[in-house]
Amino acid sequence: MNKEKGFALIFVLMVMSTMAILGTALFSRSIPERYLSERFVDSTQAFWLAEAGIQEAGFVLNSGDWTGWANQGATDKVKTASLGAGNYTVTVTDFSGANPIAVSAGTVKGVSRNIEATMRKSGSLFNAALSSQTQFQGALFNDVVFDSYDSSLGLYGGSNVGSKGNIITTAASAGAITLIKNNLVKGDVSTGPGGTVVLNDTSAVTGNITDDNNTTMNPVVIPADLSSLPSGGDYFLNGGAGTLVSGDYKFSSFKVRNGGKVTIDGTVRMYCASLPTSVSFEIALNGQVVINPGGKLIVYADGLFLVSKKGIANNTHRPKNLQIYSTLNADATWTMIGGDGSTPFEGVIYAPNTYVETNNWLEVYGSIVAKRIFYDSVYSMHYDEDLKVEGSTEQTGTAGSQYSVKQWKEQNNPYPLN
Amino acid sequence: MVEILLCMALLLVLFLGSMNVYVYCFELQETARNTSNALNDVRSKLEDIRNSDFDAIVATYNAQVVDLSKVNGIVIGKMKTEAAYVTGSNNNLIDIRAVACWRQKGGRIIGEGKIDGSGNFVLSDLNGNGKIDSPVELVTAVSKKK
């Protein structure tokens, strides 16, 4: 019996040791796990703060409002701001250049994440339903609905109707955009700094009304491979049928009259190199140009551009497949007269240094950019949001005014071993 | 006999102490796991917001409260988003904040929330600072892409 004395104590010591070892093991696993979890939260918070800095950089590059930013040398700007549980410091290098670089460091409880974004001006020329550099001719705005859709998703209608039917102008005058009678803009309306928007007689704007539009319109640049082609003279189809197959064409003028019908098969680029005072492109007297499915027509015109009656039937139903560019530099109407109401216009027009007039179209799908726009007798205008995609039109990147992120990367390893 | 009584007393003390350590450790692990899961939910929500129509962000997401994903193991929890135009940005820049709070299995509440009279978990500004606080909170900004 005496030999068994102390056994209970030894047993207790063994149990104590086992439980202590287990407890220590559990504790040593739990503490680092908690630490890693907290570090993961801090790191994620820092990342999103850094992203906030990039977003702010994009905003100031587009708005030009550098309030709160400090100069860092002649070409750089820097700003530090607190947000949430931490702060971010963003530096914009070469802020007035073509490709400014924004570097943003988000920091939370000593954990930092750095993001570098190279910006560039958006390549899209067509960022609104209507875009002009002068006051809109308000009296011509009657009973028009402006909205948007995305032609990459299908035809306009049903669920494919959006509220990006924006109208913008750089005009900074009172009534720079005046909607006279029963117009509905499902989108934003923006004028130049100090400009005002007047809504008369039940006209309404569903989006924001701002005066911060500083869009610039650069001139059209004729592609060298097109301008260097030998001229094919005047193309004139007076009745009958013709076909243009894929390729580049250079004419003095292009005219289709008296029921003539020209079919576009494939991608056709056409340069009408006429005198500025002459007619470059004309469809009249029931003439028509038909773009077949799979086709695309890109027209550069030095002179007047006239389309009437049946107009241009874009059977691809993608506005990017009918691109019209004007090189004309004149304060006169580079007339774009509409059809007879039976054929909608599904395309884009870019005429930065002259006037565009529309009338008698049933509907317009796409976008119009011009020095001045007379928008008359058009039932509705549907901006194609697909036009914002870079590369959707041939003329891109030369006239964009809005910065967007070109390249984005994280600068350092977010989870360094230390 | 004295030895046995002494041993039993020692065992009891040891057992209670160890249980406390074990419970604490399991709670730490649950908190860490739930924190990661809640953070994933919040991060996912921010991505949703970034990918939505800019003009609809404030109207859609400001003061929005949704349940945390039960898939991730948090049985009862809420996430709140806040979105507000930055002053002076002409409605072209939005600050976004998303915060997640939940109740753990043991009843501990992470973040500012409480169980209401009906037994539901609700967010509540307990410290009266005008916002819901939580260790799981993400803040960022989104600018308008014209």
Image (cartoon, rainbow, N blue to C red):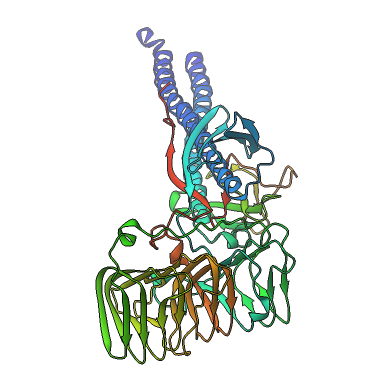
Image quarter of residue A301: bottom left
* Screen quadrant of the N terminus of chain A: top left
Percent of width and height locating residue A398: 45, 54
User: Does any portion of residue B74 appear in the rendered image?
Assistant: no
Left or right, A214 with reference to A298: right
Q: Residue at x 72, y 64 (%)?
A: A173
Q: Residue at x 73, y 47 (%)?
A: B130
Say which of B23 and A246 sits in front.
A246
Q: Is residue A115 above or below residue A124?
A: above
Q: Is residue A332 above or below residue A395?
A: below
Percent of width and height locating residue A190: 64, 63
Left or right, A60 with reference to A100: right
Q: Residue at x 50, y 47 (%)?
A: B43
Labels in figure, total: 0
User: Does any portion of residue A396 appear in the rendered image?
Assistant: yes
Left or right, A357 with reference to A208: left
Q: Residue at x 63, y 62 (%)?
A: B59
Image quarter of residue A71: top right
Q: Is residue A83 above or below residue A312?
A: above
Left or right, A49 with reference to A136: left
* Screen quadrant of the C terminus of chain A: top left
Percent of width and height locating residue A65: 66, 46
Say which of A287 and A179 sits in front.
A287
Say which of A372 and B116 sits in front.
A372
